[in-house]
Amino acid sequence: MSVKSSPLIVPLAAVLLLAAACSDSDGQAAPESSQHATAAPSPAATPPAPTPNPYADLSPAARDRQLLRAARRGNAGRIELLVEAGADVESRDADDRTPLLIAVTHDRVAAAQVLVTAGADPDALDDRHDTPWLVTGVTGSVEMARVILQADPDLTIRNRFGGVSHIPASERGHADYVAFVLEETDIAIDHVNDLGWTALLEAVILGRGTKPWQRIVETLVEHGADVSIADRDGVTASQHARRLGFTDIASILDRAPT
C-alpha cells in the first residue's frame, strides 16, 4: 500500500528553502537595509547670494567724493567698499589732497592702512607742498609713520619751508617721532631747510626748552647730529640755547662730540 504525503511536509520544506535563499554567504540572514532601496541624499544647500556693493552704481565722481569723505572720517570699512567699487585712491579734494593725505592729517590710522594696502601714493603733493609722509612729522604720530613707511615714501621730498619730516617734528616737540624716524630710516639728520636751520637748530630756536625738546636734542646728538652747524648768522644751537636760557639743552650740547 502506498504512503500518502503528509499535508504538513510540503509547506515546511518550502519555508526552509525560502530561508536559505534569503541567507548570506555566511549562513546569516541578510541585513534589513539590503532589503530596502537606499534613500536618495538631500540636495546641497544653496549658498547665500553675496551682498551687493552699495557704491557700485554710483558715478565715478560720486564714489571719489565718498572716498574723500570716508578718509576724513576714518571709516576704513567704507573705504574698502569704495575702493572695491572702483573709487580712485588718488582722487583730490579742493586743496589737492588725496584720501591718504587727508587720513594722515586727521590721524585716521586704520583708514590710512586700507589706502596704503590699495596702493595709495605716499609722495602725492597737495597745494601746500605736503605729502602724506611729510605730514606725519607735523602730527608726530609714530603709528601713522609706521603705516606710511610700508609704502616706501621718498624721505627727501621737502615741504614748503624746504624741510624734511623730522624738522617740523623737532620744532613741535614730537620726541617719540624724532626717535622713531632716526632709528628706522636713513633720513638726512643734518638736512638744512630754507631758513638755514637743521632739526637741531629748529628744536632750540622754536622749541620751549622743556623735557620734550630736551629729549629731542639728546636724541639728535646720540644719532650723530652735527652740533657745530650754525645758522645764517653764524650762531650755533648751543649759543641759541644759552641766549634763550635753556641751560639743560646747553649742557647736552656742550657734552656732545664735535
Image (spheres, rainbow, N blue to C red):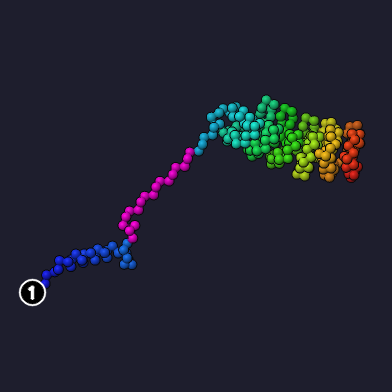
Which residue is at a point 33% across and 53% down the rendered structure image? 37
Q: Image quadrant of residue 122?
A: top right
User: If the image is split into quadrants, where does the N terminus sit?
Assistant: bottom left
Which segment did they paint magenta?
31-49
Q: Image quadrant of residue 30?
A: bottom left
Q: Give the side of residue 8 with respect to residue 196, left or right.
A: left
Residue ID for mark 1:
1
Q: Image quadrant of residue 63?
A: top right
Picture coordinates of residue 25, whole percent (x, y): 32, 66
Asked if residue 84 is among those painted magenta in the image, a careful observer would answer no
3 w.r.t. 169: above or below:
below
The kind of secondary structure the magenta stretch mainly shows is loop
Q: Give the side of residue 17 with respect to residue 201, left or right.
A: left
Which residue is at a point 60% across and 27% down the rendered structure image? 61
Picture coordinates of residue 130, whole percent (x, y): 74, 31
Say which amino acid is labelled 1. Answer: Met
User: If the image is split into quadrants, where does the C terminus sit?
Assistant: top right
